[in-house]
Amino acid sequence: ASDESFVKVSKATHGHVGIDLNTDNFLTDSEGNIVPNPRYYRTIKGKLVKEQRILSRRQQRAKKEHRSLRDSKNYQKQRLLVAK
């Protein structure tokens, strides 16, 4: 067994780090670390489609019952959920 620790502690440097935001990836710093683009829309797209279907269903039901969408509480709650 060696006496080396699992985590290497980097020496504190008082230098500056440059950050580059670009289109290929989310950001790259001057030390060569690359942070990939998070792609939130692609990961949430399926859930968004489902929530929009529910919103449409609530809109159709309010229309069928001759209610204003402003008075339809469930429609308004779903509208806010889709907007988020």
Image: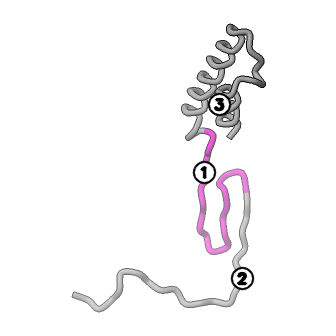
Percent coordinates x, y for residue 84 in the rendering: 68, 41
What are the residue bounds of the magenta stretch? 22-41
Count residues near mark 1 (Cα–Cα under 10 Å), then give few for <14, some for 14-19, many for 20+: few
Q: Secondary structure at mark 3?
A: helix
Q: Quadrant of residue 63?
A: top right
Which of the two labelled residues, at mark 2 and mark 3, occupies the earlier sequence position?
Answer: 2
Separation of residues labelled 3 and 1 (CA atoms): 26 Å
Q: Is residue 13 above or below residue 32?
A: below
Front tag of 2 and 3: 3
Q: Which residue is mark 3?
A: 78
Front tag of 3 and 1: 3
Q: Secondary structure at mark 1?
A: loop
The amino acid sitting under disc 3 is Gln
Give the dominant element type of the magenta stretch: helix, strand or loop. loop
Q: Which residue is mark 1?
A: 38
Count residues near mark 2 (Cα–Cα under 10 Å), then give few for <14, some for 14-19, many for 20+: few
Q: Residue at x 59, y 68 (%)?
A: 33
Q: Is residue 82 above or below residue 71?
A: below
Q: Quadrant of residue 68?
A: top right
Q: Quadrant of residue 30?
A: bottom right
Percent coordinates x, y for residue 72 in the rendering: 70, 23
